[in-house]
Image (spheres, rainbow, N blue to C red):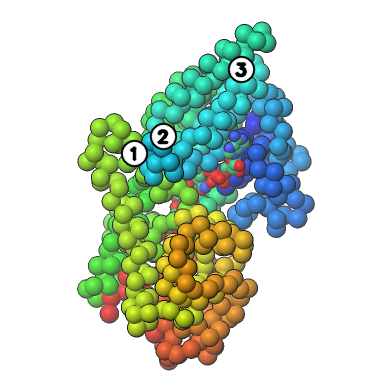
Amino acid sequence: MSSIKIQKICCIGAGYVGGPTMSVIADKCPDLEVRVVDINKDRIEAWNDSDLTKLPIFEPGLDRIISRTRGRNLFFSLEMEKSISDADMVFISVNTPTKTKGLGAGQASDLSWVEASARQVAKYAKGHTIVIEKSTLPVRTAQAIKEILKTTTNRENQKNDISKTFSVLSNPEFLAEGTAINDLEKPDRVLIGGEDPEAVEALVNIYLNWVPSEQIICTNLWSSELSKLAANAFLAQRISSINSISAFCEATGADVQEVAKAIGTDKRIGDQFLSAGPGFGGSCFKKDILNLVYLSGYFGLPEVANYWNQVVLLNTWQQDRIYKIVLEKLFGTVNGKNIAILGFSFKANTNDTRESPAIRISCDLLEEGANLSIYDPKVSVERVEEDLEKTSFNNQGTWKMVNSIPEALKNVDAVLIITAWDEFFGLDWNYLASLMRSPAWVFDTRSVINRQEIENTGINLWKLGEGS
Ligand code: NAD
Ligand code: UGA
């Protein structure tokens, strides 16, 4: 048994990872007190809203867990100092986006928020504190965190004559949005990297409340940090691989669904992550691969950097090629044409739009002068507005957000299905065709339509990865 007894946990960052992860820890460990802190006042207020439909993130099953833990042993607050100083264990779960300026801009991760968090911990912690990297970080970031904790603390200790000590662990998160609660409750594995056996054991003991011991993998710090980047790179690589094959299918008359099934039955390949689509979105795949590319260059491995960079290039190409196909099928111009966009989040079952293929494709169409009616069951109009304004440089068209599929399809020349929300499957295309202008086109980038459903409706159907 670890001699370190954990009673209070603090998590810095109440985002898509911090919120659900801490909710599940609080749920599974009722004897622990879990405090999630953030600098974003609106976000904390939303986490504390009594109306659970107003939680800042939509994640199936999250409201159920929040309703039984919040106020019991789970608290969301802005109170940084007390939450850190009371805690035996502090998780850092802040954003680590790609740098936009300075050395490594466009590739390296921006660690400003991680560094700020480490400084807060160094300043406010008391006694011995286990600091855990939950954010996805470049390899060897733990070393930087240790340095910050050590140097800032030395100064603090001299000033206040108190002693504080730290152990730093890496415990990357592998949840996927939309399935986060299931991923957290039944993880394939939990990964813990660290050099201090007592600290490692203390964290293992928390997970043992619900994760079988054989699924808890302990490694050294650097393997743990790198495994997270490598896992995301491998997953994204599979998507770029199948997307490259989707283009091949369209060119040759093969069908990417059939190919995916045929290759996926080989146990060595496996059937997961073989759905061709409009390119991967989400806040992490692109940023984590670019980070890997940057680090490969930094460590003098340009061939490795080029290899991984190709995964991102193919992803951008896939999004670009979809927009060009729409243009080509609509006689080379969408200027003044009405187009419905079904789905704006980067995948189904989340309200997250970060790096959503819908943003780039919509902006390209707007720049060509299209009028878009956008429908998504969970994404807010404010979110869409911010995304489109940030990305579109020369917007010639118009866009509006609507509340239903029929409203989106009224008088449109074409429909683009970009996210595979459940409600887009099995639609009454006979009825929907009557709302559209002809010649009507449906561009299905997620294989939600069965070709028979659309037969005899007069609609032209283009399906990604289906050759004619
Ligand atoms: P997010 O942007 O949703 O949340 C981060 C939160 O941290 C924000 O609310 C922000 O206000 C807060 N924050 C930033 N600096 C702070 C500070 N100094 N003090 C207090 N709060 C601060 O990000 P996310 O999606 O939760 O991702 C967090 C990390 O987890 C990233 O490194 C990401 O790569 C990784 N990750 C994300 C996912 C995912 O599905 N989103 C999955 C696994 C890992
Ligand atoms: C991904 C990983 O799956 C998680 O393990 C990881 O923790 C997380 O990134 C992270 O580090 O942030 P997430 O981005 O939430 O999770 O969702 P995914 O299910 O991986 O989907 C990512 C993108 O790939 C989506 O746009 C999705 O539509 C696309 N995708 C996924 C495909 O196009 N085809 C597939 O077969 C699978």
Q: CA distance from mark 1 to mark 3?
A: 35 Å
Residue 183 vs residue 328: left or right?
Answer: right
State how far apart marks 2 and 3 are (Cα). Answer: 25 Å
- Residue at 68 percent of width and 11 percent of height: 160
Residue 80 got which mark? none
Relative to 68, residue 263 above or below: below
* Residue 23 percent coordinates (x, y): 64, 43
Q: Quadrant of ligand 1?
A: top right
Respond yes or no on whether mark 2 lies under 8 Å from ligand 1: no
* Residue 413 place in picture, x, y as percent: 46, 83
Give the mark nearest the N terminus, 1 or 3: 3
Q: Position of residue 387 (x, y in %)?
A: 53, 59
Q: Position of residue 426 (x, y in %)?
A: 51, 77
**Which residue matches tag 1?**
294
Q: Nearer the viewer, mark 1 or mark 2?
A: 1
**Image quarter of residue 178:** bottom right
Which residue is under mark 2?
138
- Dot 3 amino acid type: His
Callouts 1 and 2 close, C-beta under 8 Å: yes
Q: Point out the image quarter for the N terminus.
A: top right
**Residue 41, image quadrant:** top right
Give the mark nearer the N terminus: 2 vs 3: 3
For residue 35, what is the image quadrant?
Answer: top right
Left or right of 47? Residue 185 is left
Question: Residue at 39% across / 45% down in the picture?
Answer: 106
Q: Nearer the viewer, mark 2 or mark 3?
A: 2
Residue position for label 3: 128
Q: Which element is circle 3 on?
A: strand
